[in-house]
Amino acid sequence: MFSGILKVVEIGNSRGVRIPSRLIQRYGIEDEIQLLETADGLLLRPVRSGKLSFEESFRQMAADSDSQAEAVSLEGTLVDGLEVEDWSSIAAATRRKRKKSVERRPR
């Protein structure tokens, strides 16, 4: 983590700070950064497209313990409970319906 003092410099009619290049690279800062005023001070964030790459998504999920817990809770749901369904009652009901429809057919 970086901790340091940055000089405020004149940039045309404005003033700004120079961000060290290693931080620019680490946070993937390109053309813009977002400035947020918080109760603790100013916060700078890189502006990113809303879409994460697969690698970024996986990295973010791996670091998030809530996401890990959710993934574990979903484990085994891929079969959607079909393995525990009582198919014998469904099969019997289907046979009864077929038998009734055969009995009603005109000959």
Image (cartoon, rainbow, N blue to C red):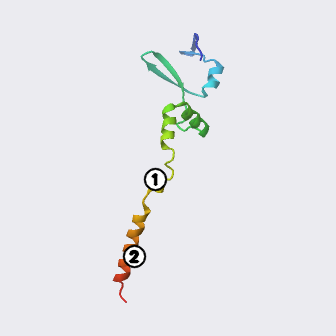
Amino acid at circle 1: Gly
- Give the labeled residue for mark 1: 81
Assess disc 2: are there few (<14), some (14-19) or many (≥20) residues with their C-alpha within 10 Å of its C-alpha.
few
Q: Residue, x 49% and y 43% (percent of image)? A: 74
Instruction: Please tell me the numbered disc located at residue 60.
Output: none
Q: Secondary structure at mark 2?
A: helix
x and y, in percent, of residue 38 in the image: 44, 19
x and y, in percent, of residue 64 in the image: 52, 31
- Image height check: is 10 above or below 35? above
x and y, in percent, of residue 62 in the image: 56, 33
- Give the labeled residue for mark 2: 98
Amino acid at circle 2: Arg
- Image height check: is 105 above or below 50? below
Assess disc 1: are there few (<14), some (14-19) or many (≥20) residues with their C-alpha within 10 Å of its C-alpha.
few
Residue lying at the far bottom in this picture: please name it: 107
x and y, in percent, of residue 28 in the image: 61, 28
Q: Residue, x 35% and y 87% (percent of image)? A: 106
Number of numbered discs overlaid on the protein picture: 2
- Looking at the image, is mark 1 or mark 2 earlier in the sequence? 1
